[in-house]
Amino acid sequence: MDIEQDVPLAPFTSLRLGGPARYLARCASVDDIREALAWAAGRELAVHVLGGGSNTLFTDVGFDGLVLHVGLHGIDVQPGSTAETAIVTAAAGEDWDRFVARCIAEDLSGNECLSGIPGLVGATPIQNVGAYGQEVAESIIEVRALERATQDEVVFGAHDCGFAYRTSRFKAVDRDRFLITAVCYRLTRGESPAIRYAELSDRLQAAGIDVATLPPGRVASTAVRDVVLAVRRDKSMVLDVDDPNARSAGSFFLNPVLTAEQLHRVCEGWCRLGGAEKDIPMFATDDGTKVPAAWLVERAGFARGTRRGSAGISDKHALALVSHGDSATDLLALAAEVVAAVEQAFGVVLEREPVVVDPRYQ
Ligand code: NAP
């Protein structure tokens, strides 16, 4: 395996930002990964593990260490314990959306609402990727990984992954400890997808589609996939090099789950701005009340299309920060301005979603 030097990182990410990597290793096998980790350890270099680059922000100084690009491929479909299930194992480097399409083609459902999410399979357990009423924690049964320090193979059952709303042990207590090599999902065969999200059922209805009356399996899941892709495209939330609003890391902030006290402060803030409490969108969860971050951002004064230098808020969705140039510094300055304004208006500190690969921004 070649180790490349001084490789520009911008082309590896959806934001297309970032200076060079001092070293880069493209790893096509678990042996390559082991070799790259050992090579970096021998030189006491920092290692950054890079997948699809859709949730990563490299800064203008680049990365003074080894960027390890995970290029593991392969999808294996096996019968489940009943005729209605299948066990699908995908290598970490498989493109997530192509994987969803392949599952649907195999007549499997359980991840169709996650169509169009950019990134690789290996990233999905880390933040328990979810959208439109579905999340990967519902279907993951096993995560295979290498412990980075020892290079031992470790297998986690779903209950060992610490899944919660958009997080897991791999993002929390064990951040950067493991490198995910493969993920194993249990999907259902020949069933109708469950529609649990108002925006999705509205769009299906508007398109004249009643999922319950479609043949279960491939036909019904394809209909849901097509509508999800259309919804995401309308928000510039699918990768598209011709769409300037898609030059983003998707949602830049997590949707906050608020305590009663935090929610009260949001209400106070909104009333101070002349709004009425009943107009605040909110969704009850087991852990508190979710208020869309995009709503907070817009009400704190950041309209869609706002520009600061080469950075901006997407014209389509207030939660996506977009780069119109080549300055990560501009983008991070805009992010900081948004966080400060939302905190001042509503007392809520928005949490960044993309990983910023620079110790100065940890
Ligand atoms: P959205 O649909 O405008 O929703 C914003 C927030 O309101 C989300 O927190 C969403 O909860 C909540 N919400 C909306 N309708 C709901 C309902 N019927 N029941 C319960 N909660 C509801 O969000 P968006 O930014 O355009 O994103 C669309 C979807 O993609 C959302 O599901 C979002 O979570 C997901 N997404 C996921 C990731 C990720 O996994 N990292 C990144 C970006 C967006 P939920 O978050 O529970 O859906």
Image: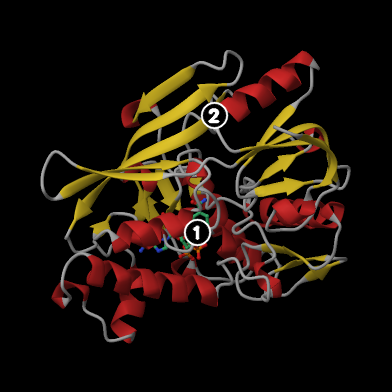
Taking the image as shown, residue 84 lies to the left or right of residue 152, namely left
- Asked which colour scheme the image uses, the reply is secondary structure
Q: Quadrant of residue 67?
A: top right
Compared with 216, 78 (above or below) is above
- Name the residue tied to disc 1: 117
Q: Is residue 335 visible?
A: yes
Residue 291 location (% of width, % of height) = 49, 57
Residue placed at 51% from the left, 51% from the top?
A: 264
Of helix, strand and loop, which one carries label 1? loop
Q: Position of residue 133 (x, y in %)?
A: 35, 58
- Number of other residues with Cα within 10 Å of mark 1, as a class: few under 14, some 14 to 19, many 20 or more: many
Q: Amino acid at mark 1?
A: Ile
Task: Name the residue at 36% across, 79% down.
Answer: 203
Q: Secondary structure at mark 2?
A: helix
Identify the disc placed on residue 30: 2
Q: Nearer the viewer, residue 101 or 327?
A: 101
Residue reaching furthest to the left: 83
For ligand 1, tell me if the residue under mark 1 lies within 8 Å.
yes
Under mark 2, the amino acid is Val
